[in-house]
Image (cartoon, rainbow, N blue to C red):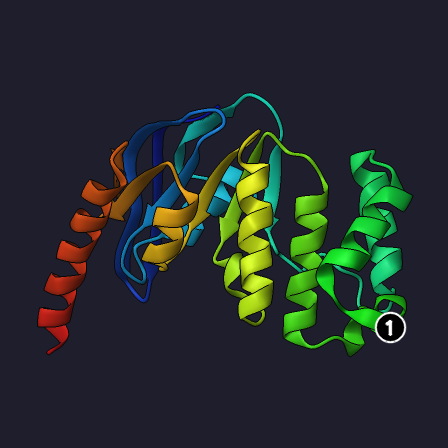
């Protein structure tokens, strides 16, 4: 379970204030996949970073029970001079999981072939994303944080990623930032809409999607 208590966050850029969290109070329940919807710039990724602990709120707090993943698919922590295998083994030691089991899982899942034994700096962006997704899914967390990651790769890999993610959330919770409404319907149990610093939580996904689409229609009219 993750609870946001009076969470506030404002960015100031060139004299302009951008509020991404305005006294947000929300509970993300156990073993529930929740989509975070909202227009570009609403602050969805910033909210995910605050939940992950990689960004501090201005005030308020994030209270959690159980373990929380880093944002699934985040490849920024890989050492570029180390091979994919070496990076996976290092992460396994950090999180206290069996390095051999994790390496075998990631090798099979990520589909990077011989590159698994080459430095990560030689990887394409897609290969890094597949490696990162494999590492994330190979470690059990009580809550997975996801930021558009299952969109990487070709159609077959996306299907495999969706299936693995669906299997993980049978036993864990997830908070997913995505623009893919098909993914929301397929993978998530609840959804929330972030707008003007307020998070509107829905147990009915279709109501959340309708709210999101109404915001996007207004946004489109403004730019027309």
Work out which quarter of the rendered image holds the C terminus and state it: bottom left
Question: Please, which residue is most extreme toward the top here?
Answer: 65
Left or right of residue 181, residue 122 in this image? right
Left or right of residue 7, residue 108 in this image? right
Q: Nearer the viewer, residue 173 or 25?
A: 173
Q: At 86% across and 40% down in the image, what residue appears?
A: 93
Q: Nearer the viewer, residue 102 or 109?
A: 109
Q: At 69% across and 70% down in the image, what residue appears?
A: 127
Q: Please tell me in which quadrant of the rendered image residue 160 appears.
A: bottom right
How many labels, in total?
1
Q: Is residue 160 visible?
A: yes
Q: Is residue 113 above or below residue 46?
A: below
Specify few, some or many for label 1: CA neighbours under 10 Å numbering under 14, 14-19, or 20 or more.
few
Q: At 40% across and 42% down in the image, what residue appears?
A: 188
Q: Where is residue 40 drawn, in percent x and y?
A: 31, 63
Q: Which residue is mark 1?
A: 114
Q: Where is residue 67 drawn, in percent x and y?
A: 62, 29
Q: Is residue 206 above or below residue 18?
A: above
Q: Nearer the viewer, residue 207 or 37?
A: 207
Q: Where is residue 173 drawn, in percent x and y?
A: 51, 32
Q: Where is residue 211 drawn, in percent x and y?
A: 17, 48
Q: At 49% across and 54% down in the image, what residue appears?
A: 147
Q: Is residue 4 visible?
A: no
Q: Please tell me in which quadrant of the rendered image residue 32 appears.
A: top left
Q: Circle 1 sits in a helix, a strand or a loop, which is it?
A: helix
């Amino acid at each position: 379970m993750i609870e946001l208590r009076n969470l506030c966050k404002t960015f100031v850029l060139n004299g302009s204030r951008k509020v991404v969290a305005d006294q947000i109070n929300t509970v993300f329940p156990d073993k529930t996949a929740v989509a975070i919807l909202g227009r570009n710039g609403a602050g969805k990724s910033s909210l995910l970073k605050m939940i992950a602990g990689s960004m501090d709120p201005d005030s308020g707090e994030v209270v959690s029970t159980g373990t929380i993943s880093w944002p699934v698919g985040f490849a920024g922590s890989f050492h570029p001079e180390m091979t994919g295998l070496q990076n996976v083994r290092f992460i396994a030691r950090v999180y206290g999981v069996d390095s051999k089991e994790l390496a075998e899982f990631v090798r099979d899942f990520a589909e990077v072939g011989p590159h698994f034994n080459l430095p990560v700096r030689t990887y394409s962006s897609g290969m890094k994303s597949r490696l990162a997704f494999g590492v994330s899914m190979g470690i059990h967390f009580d809550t997975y944080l996801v930021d558009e990651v299952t969109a990487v790769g070709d159609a077959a890999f996306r299907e495999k990623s969706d299936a693995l993610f669906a299997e993980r959330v049978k036993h864990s919770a997830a908070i997913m930032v995505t623009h893919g409404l098909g993914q929301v319907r397929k993978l998530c149990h609840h959804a929330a809409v972030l707008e003007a610093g307020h998070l509107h939580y829905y147990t009915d996904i279709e109501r959340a999607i309708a709210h999101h689409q109404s915001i996007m229609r207004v946004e489109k009219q403004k730019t027309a």
